[in-house]
């Protein structure tokens, strides 16, 4: 029997929003959610046999999009993790399949072996956790990703428009989330590269404040970061 008990973490979890998350997120994203998610998935350059990890997966929307491109016969699998047990329970009920699985786990302590995923993805997760957990989570993503594997992150970043700045800063204060303030100050690139990933590429910014980043785990690791 699957255990849906939430993981103890210093980060913010969204158990309280699990029942309405799939309804509210498209509205919060001004109808751009599906477009952004599909762009993220395209950047993963998915092959049918890939093993792909979705960090902070929520109810598994992106995990399912990824899994649709995988083959169970070729042992492809998309795995979504989230510390919020109610989110994972909803994901299992709505989206689990032969190529799509879910697990309650904290991003800063992933229950997987080193070098076991072909790609790691995260969408709108890192603005929920504070700076020290951001660093630990990206270090964990680096650990479980195969050399040459891709990292794709879509999250709040430095606003590029007046509207983007208004939305991002209003969200920070209304939701009492200083973690959002960290993101919109632009901390993600330095943290990601500090974890060992190659030079980060900013692919696109949507709505003036949600940026999509692409990087990879170098084939040859720098011994200075080990």
Image (cartoon, helix red, strand yellow):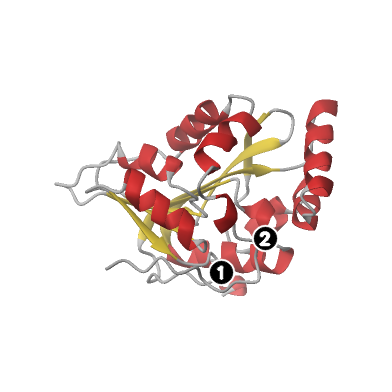
Classify residue 104 as left or right of residue 69: right
x and y percentages locating residue 113 in the rendered image: 37, 71
x and y percentages locating residue 226 in the rendered image: 56, 75
207, above or below 182, in the image: above
| Residue shown at the point (38%, 37%) measured from the top left | 65
| Residue shown at the point (62%, 41%) measured from the top left | 201
Classify residue 135 as left or right of residue 64: right
Circles 2 and 1: CB distance less than 8 Å?
Answer: yes
1, above or below 163, in the image: below
Q: Residue 16's quadrant in the figure?
A: bottom right
| Residue shown at the point (68%, 59%) measured from the top left | 191
x and y percentages locating residue 84 in the rendered image: 52, 61
Tag 2 residue: 129
Tag 1 residue: 108
Frontmost of labels 2 and 1 is: 2
| Residue shown at the point (33%, 49%) measured from the top left | 93
Residue 161 seen by the camera: no
Residues at marks 2 and 1, CA–CA distance in whole angstroms: 10 Å
Label ID, residue 218: none
């Amino acid at each position: 029997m699957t255990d849906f008990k939430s993981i103890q973490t210093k980060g913010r979890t969204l158990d309280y929003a699990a029942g309405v998350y799939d309804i509210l997120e498209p509205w919060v994203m001004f109808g751009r959610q599906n477009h952004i998610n599909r762009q993220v998935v395209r950047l993963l350059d998915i092959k049918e046999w890939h093993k792909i990890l979705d960090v902070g997966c929520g109810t598994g929307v992106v995990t399912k999009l990824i899994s649709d491109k995988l083959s169970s016969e070729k042992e492809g699998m998309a795995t979504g993790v989230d510390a919020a047990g109610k989110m994972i329970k909803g994901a299992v009920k709505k989206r689990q399949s032969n190529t799509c699985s879910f697990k309650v786990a904290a991003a800063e302590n992933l229950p997987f072996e080193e070098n076991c995923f072909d790609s790691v993805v995260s969408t709108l997760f890192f603005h929920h956790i504070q700076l020290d957990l951001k660093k630990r989570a990206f270090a964990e993503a680096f650990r479980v990703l195969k050399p040459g594997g891709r990292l794709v992150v879509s999250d709040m970043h430095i606003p590029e428009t007046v509207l983007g700045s208004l939305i991002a800063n209003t969200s920070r204060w209304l939701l009492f989330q200083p973690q959002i303030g960290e993101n919109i100050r632009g901390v993600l690139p330095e943290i990601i590269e500090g974890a060992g990933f190659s030079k980060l590429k900013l692919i696109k910014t949507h709505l003036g404040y949600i940026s999509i980043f692409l990087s990879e785990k170098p084939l040859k690791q720098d011994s200075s970061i080990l």
